[in-house]
Image (tube, rainbow, N blue to C red):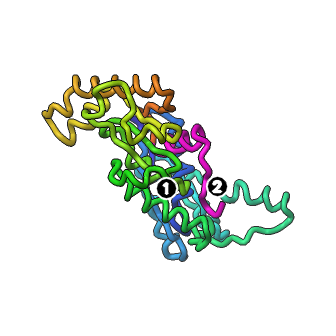
């Protein structure tokens, strides 16, 4: 497999450069990306160290490194351009056009998108995270009625990380309820969920994937056997069908995409980033 070095540079956290760069790189198959990260580049000395690293790697590999940047300092950006690299600068690509349209120069202040905003939205998201933790695995049945959405599914389908992400990213009050073998005597909703049916959103995945996840946790157990995983998934998926519970197959889907799908399909209010 071809190898290629790629750098993510930022004068703050580097989250934006990494996220956008990764989204672009996923469109190219057959390449093993050797990733290098340099965040909080706020001095000429730090920039020079990165330039030397870029040049060394380019010489070793016989080709320029790829560099994804959200640097705002024009001087530092100019120095990076002189390195042996192909530079993809996300901010400069758009700031010039925005400046012309808005007839206003950009502030060029690093980190503004990650400033801690002590507003109602921020505190709602903090409360949503606490809610997700308190209601994990149906641990507190009394507060399920307060949920914006109740994520359901058999054990190890990814309910907890999805709920936490929904809280952190969107400020959604997301609870989760795990279906257990005791729930599977008949194709019917557990009594606790019957009055909350409209809030349910199901997760599922294929049998092989579920078995693999369970096998890592409890190797050789009945819980992790193919037959048991298949039985539970068949019951669960029939329940989704019979009670018209919206669901998503998470086998090859990221937490981010699962969460965005739930927000969209369940028509949930987004309470993020000051909105």
Q: Earlier in the sequence, mark 2 or mark 1?
A: 2
Q: Is residue 61 visible?
A: no
Q: Element at badge 1?
A: helix
Q: Is residue 37 visible?
A: yes
The residue to which callout 1 is attached is 167
Q: Which one is in front, 201 or 50?
A: 201
Residue 16, compared with residue 230, is above or below; it is below
Q: Nearer the viewer, mark 2 or mark 1?
A: 1
The quarter of the rendered structure image containing the C terminus is bottom right
Horizontal side of 172 relative to 100 (left or right) equals left
Q: Position of residue 48 (x, y in %)?
A: 50, 70
Residue 139, compared with residue 9, is above or below; it is above
Q: Which one is in front, 246 or 103?
A: 246
- Magenta stretch bounds: 255-275
Q: Is residue 75 magenta?
A: no
Q: How many marks?
A: 2
Q: Position of residue 90 (x, y in %)?
A: 64, 55
Horizontal side of 34 relative to 106 (left or right) equals left
The quarter of the rendered structure image containing the N terminus is top left
Q: Is residue 256 magenta?
A: yes
Q: Position of residue 84 (x, y in %)?
A: 54, 56
Residue lying at 17% horizontally and 40% vertically, measured from the top left: 218
Residue 56 image label? none
Horizontal side of 172 relative to 236 (left or right) equals right
Residue 147, compared with residue 225, is above or below; it is below
Q: Element at badge 2?
A: helix
Residue lying at 28% horizontally and 27% vertically, measured from the top left: 185
Q: Position of residue 187 (x, y in %)?
A: 36, 25
The Cα–Cα distance between marks 2 and 1, rounded to whole angstroms, is: 28 Å
Using a 10 Å C-alpha cutoff, classify the residue at mark 1 as few (fewer than 14 neighbours), some (14 to 19) or many (20 or more): many
The residue to which callout 2 is attached is 90
Residue lying at 50% horizontally and 46% vertically, measured from the top left: 149
């Amino acid at each position: 497999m071809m190898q290629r070095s790629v750098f993510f540079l930022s004068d703050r956290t580097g989250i934006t450069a990494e996220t956008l760069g990764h989204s672009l790189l996923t469109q190219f198959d057959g390449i093993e990306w050797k990733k290098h990260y340099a965040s909080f580049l706020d001095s000429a000395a730090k920039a020079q160290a990165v330039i030397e690293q870029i040049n060394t790697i380019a010489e070793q590999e016989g080709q320029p490194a790829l560099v994804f940047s959200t640097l705002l300092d024009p001087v530092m950006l100019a120095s990076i351009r002189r390195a042996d690299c192909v530079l993809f600068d996300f901010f400069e690509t758009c700031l010039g056009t925005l400046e012309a349209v808005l007839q206003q120069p950009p502030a060029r202040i690093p980190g503004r998108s990650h400033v801690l905003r002590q507003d109602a939205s921020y505190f709602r998201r903090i409360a949503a995270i606490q809610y997700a933790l308190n209601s994990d695995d149906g641990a507190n049945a009394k507060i399920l009625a307060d949920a914006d959405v109740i994520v359901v599914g058999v054990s190890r389908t990814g309910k907890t990380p999805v709920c936490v992400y929904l809280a952190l990213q969107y400020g959604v009050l997301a609870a989760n309820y795990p279906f257990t073998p005791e729930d599977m005597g008949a194709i019917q909703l557990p009594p606790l969920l019957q009055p909350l049916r409209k809030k349910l959103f199901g997760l599922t995945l294929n049998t092989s994937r579920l078995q693999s996840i369970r096998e890592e946790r409890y190797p050789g157990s009945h819980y992790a056997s193919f037959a048991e995983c298949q039985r539970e998934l068949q019951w669960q998926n029939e329940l989704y069908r019979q009670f018209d519970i919206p669901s998503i197959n998470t086998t090859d889907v990221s937490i981010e995409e699962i969460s965005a799908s739930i927000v969209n399909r369940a028509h949930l209010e987004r309470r993020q980033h000051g909105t």
